[in-house]
Image: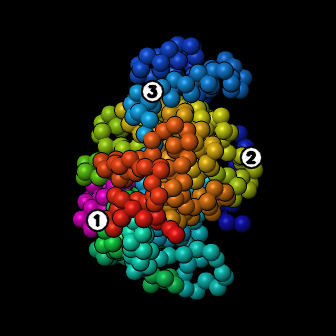
Amino acid sequence: MSWIDERASSLEAGEFGFEVLPETDQSFENALAKARNGERLTVDDGIELMTTGTDTAGLDPRRKELVLEAADRRRADVVGDEVTFVANVNNNVTTACNVGCLFCNFKDTAHQFEEDYQEEHAGFTKTPAESHDIVKDAVERGVYEVTSVSGLHPGMTLDEEHREVLAAADDPELNFKSPDRYETPPATYREQIRAMADTGAHVHSMTPEEVYHAQRGADWGYEYVYRKLADVGLKTVPGTAAEILVDEVRDVICPGKITTEQWVESMRAAAEVGLPMTATIMYGHVENEAHRVEHLKVIRDLQDETGNITEFVPLSFVHQNTPLHEHGVVESGASKAEDELMVAVARLFLDNVEHIQSSWVKYGDEHGMKLLNCGADDFMGTILSEEITKRAGGEYGEFRSFRDYAEMITAIGRTPVERSTDYTERRRVDPDADVIGPELGPEADGTPLLD
């Protein structure tokens, strides 16, 4: 049994001793009135809306619909009836990782990648040339953005100087092994970012966790790393690795990851460098509704401070092939009603974040479209390749054509709009056109991404 499995099997479902609980002195009616009036909500207000009233056992269907209606009206007031999406491709560089998050089945324990490991595994590490070719092919088809989020490979460093620092330190706590020990020696972060950026694609990469990994043992700080990466083509930052930004939850599901404050510190640094960023939540596992709202408060405070968050992305936990599920710590992910309330309360609580995303990869088409009527206004991207959710047991595919987008969005009475990663470029898509394809990418000419 691996240490990851040992950690998961040591947990008892629901027995976590959390101090943050969904209990308030507020009433649902007062919280809803504040939301309808556009007043800034408190954490207690958010909890009442998320639970549909803490004095009610389970979710109250009538109250839930009132929250969804308020959020949909707020969405219409803030962004109108446009539903945006981006032409993008995923290029995850490596699955090798030693962090051991209990919600993840994307990673492969890094020692499996070493040259002397004899057994087969499904993991991969790409060379910069391979990353370049994958992204270049997508750009030639019309893609605008490459999203790249990867495991924390022990051999990956920011650059050659960082590699020398770690080798000299010779400290096992720094999670470093020489690249030469691996069947495919990992390149540096700068080499990978440069290879993808050289295609002309907008590079959306380097989570706070990856940036922490890219300066471990060097004491350079997050801002130094982001500047080094921006110099070779990094354009925007995905605010993933957030999971739940409450440390008592992180201690259960990802004890090896950075803390809430370290995540916030990294995002502040990205803003200081001038890199727009997204923010996420991964919910529906061991956390409760109060944790979800506390997470929203962290995001709202960060946005008050930086004004740099372009969109908020709720990610419903896909449980099937994860250690949390395999060891009986959780039985399922969030319900559809919880998904709806997560999106709706995010819209009402995050009064300083303009865009809320519905992820068709996480929710599927029907449910994902429903969430566009619960406060969301963005429907993700085309995603020519998707590996993380798929490996965890996701069932909703990995490609969405522009014609699909145009037809689906028009069918619910909304306007389809192609966007850039940071929302600064937008164009309305004509659903009645004979040929529908991307036009914002560096080589896009309006033809479909795939035949």
Regarding residue 18, the answer to whether it shows in the image is: no
Q: First in sequence, mark 3 or 2: give its number.
A: 3
- Residue indicated by mark 3: 74
| Mark 1 surroundings within 10 Å by alpha-carbon count, few (fewer than 14), some (14 through 19), many (20 or more) | many
Type of amino acid under label 2: Glu
- Neighbor class of circle 2 (other Cα within 10 Å; few <14, some 14-19, many 20+) is few
Q: Residue at (45%, 81%) from the top-left corner?
A: 185
Q: CA distance from mark 1 to mark 3?
A: 36 Å
Residue 367 drawn above or below residue 399: above
Mark 1 vs mark 3: which is more N-terminal? 3
Q: Nearer the viewer, mark 2 or mark 1?
A: 1
Q: Closer to the camera, 79 or 353?
A: 79
Residue 54 horizontal/vertical position (percent)? 64, 21
> Which residue is pictured at 59% across the width and 38% down the height?
370
Q: Which residues are magenta?
A: 221-240
Considering the image in quadrants, where does the N terminus appear?
bottom right
Between 251 and 449, the one lying in front of the other is 449
Residue 411 image label: none
> Is 267 above or below relative to 294?
below
Mark whose residue sits in front, 1 or 3: 3
What residue is pinned by disc 2? 331
Give the mark count. 3
Compared across the picture, whether 196 is left or right of 92 comes to: left
Residue 114: name its quadrant.
bottom right
Q: Which amino acid type is shown beneath numbered disc 1?
A: Gly
Tell me how far mark 3 sits from mark 2, CA to CA. Answer: 34 Å
> Image quadrant of residue 326?
bottom right
Q: Up-down: is 108 above or below 64? A: below
Q: Which residue is mark 1?
A: 233
Residue 206 in percent (x, y) is at 39, 60
Comparing labels 3 and 2, the label whose residue is closer to the camera: 3
